[in-house]
Amino acid sequence: MNRRQMLLSGAAFALAPRMANAQAAKPLKIGIMNDMSSVYADYQGIGSVVSARLAVDDYSAHLGVPVEIIFADHQNKPDIGAGIARDWFDNQSVDVAMDLPNSAVALAVLGVADQKNKAVIGSGAGSSIMTGPKCSRNFIHWTYDTYALGTGLGKALVGQGAKTWFFISADYAFGKDLESNCAAAVEASGGKVLGTVRHPLNTADFSSFLLQAQASGADVVAFANAGGDLNNSFKQAAEFGLSKKQRLAGLILNVTNIPALGLAAVQNSTICTGFYWDMNDDTRAFAKRFQSAHPTKMMPNDMHAGMYSATAHLIKAMAVLKSAADGVKLIDQMKAMPTDDPLFGKGSIRVDGRKLHPMYLLETKTVEESKGDWDYFKVLAAIKPEDAWRPLDKGGCPFVKA
């Protein structure tokens, strides 16, 4: 048994006592599916389970909704994700599939959920097509999407004078959509895209891509990738000396990337996010609980916070509806209720499934400004929901248009 398996086994054991104490009524059964062992394991992984359990601790008994949680590793493979979802829905009485980083996997799972009329909530999934052409009445997109990240950051950096861009993007739905949304914002703001290259998931050697970016002479080299791929991109870019003449932009850079990179490697970086652990007393209190419960004692990122927020709202909806048997009805109940939690504040869920809340522009602190581990960012500005998210009439969601 390796270290990763030990962590997962320990987490499953930790859930058992709480499940054993559930009420006699049939519990709401949540299946959390993500990458537990590879490129996105720190981005979501066991941290998403920790966050969901914290929400259960805060809301389940109070609202009289017993909850059971199981989790699985989709290995970033759509066929494996779809197979897990089918088994969950057919054989394990799972009511709701959650998290789902890797948009290709999320779309595969959503295809199964549509057939079975089960609810799906994406905290880790990113592609904005999931509330656009690929929208579903069974789906809510919770924490972020590629439109909000790409548009927010593209506008901000062009406004700071970074006019020409080169993209290095992950070659699947998430990376392509993130690149497309950011490129559109860059061009709409008066900038220009000089070129783009795409790489397979879990790439070890970025040298050929970085040489093309360097040769382009672009003001900004933008990485439309995440997790370990983003870390490798930044590390190798530093080795090639790109940051001496070009600005590096990690479109989904967040707090969980920095320990592996070091704060010095990401100086002068701006990010767009819906949550940072050190924003206020409520976020700090959650982060302290999360860190205490996490096997490797990391701080939560926005997707972990999204899992807490989404689970809390799901439990509130179940307290009203009393049943998760009909996935569309459950999703409709969640849409009908305003969202409100200590991490994202007040918000709402739009008819196309897009959860709406403010987004924030953050800038990395200097090494001198940082007071220690996990103290990496400062808030530059808030983006209002109506400015952060793609307008409803621009998404192309078929059932909204109908």
Image: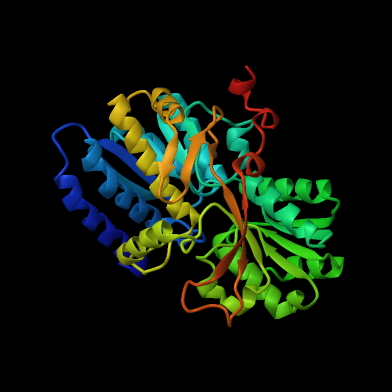
In the image, residue 397 lies at what x, y percent?
Answer: 62, 27
Q: How is the image coloured?
A: rainbow
Q: Going 54% across and 39% down the picture, which residue do you hit? A: 356
Q: Residue furthest bottom?
A: 368
In the image, residue 237 lies at what x, y percent?
Answer: 70, 73
Q: Residue furthest front?
A: 281
Q: Quadrant location of residue 65?
A: top left
Q: Residue furthest top?
A: 402
In this rendering, is residue 288 above or below 150? below
Q: Going 58% across and 50% down the picture, which residue do you hit? A: 359
How many labels sit on residues?
0
In the image, residue 260 lies at what x, y percent?
Answer: 52, 74
Q: Quadrant of the C terminus?
A: top right
In the image, residue 112 lies at what x, y percent?
Answer: 46, 31
Q: Which sits in the foreground, 191 or 199?
A: 191
Q: Going 17% across and 31% down the picture, which residue do you hit? A: 25
Q: Quadrant location of residue 11?
A: bottom left
Q: From this viewpoint, is residue 357 visible?
A: yes
In this rendering, is residue 18 above or below 85? below
Left or right of residue 387: residue 15: left
Q: Quadrant location of residue 94?
A: top left
Q: Quadrant of the N terminus?
A: bottom left
Q: Which sits in the foreground, 246 or 339?
A: 339
Q: From this viewpoint, is residue 84 visible?
A: no
Q: Going 34% across and 55% down the picture, which residue do you hit? A: 50
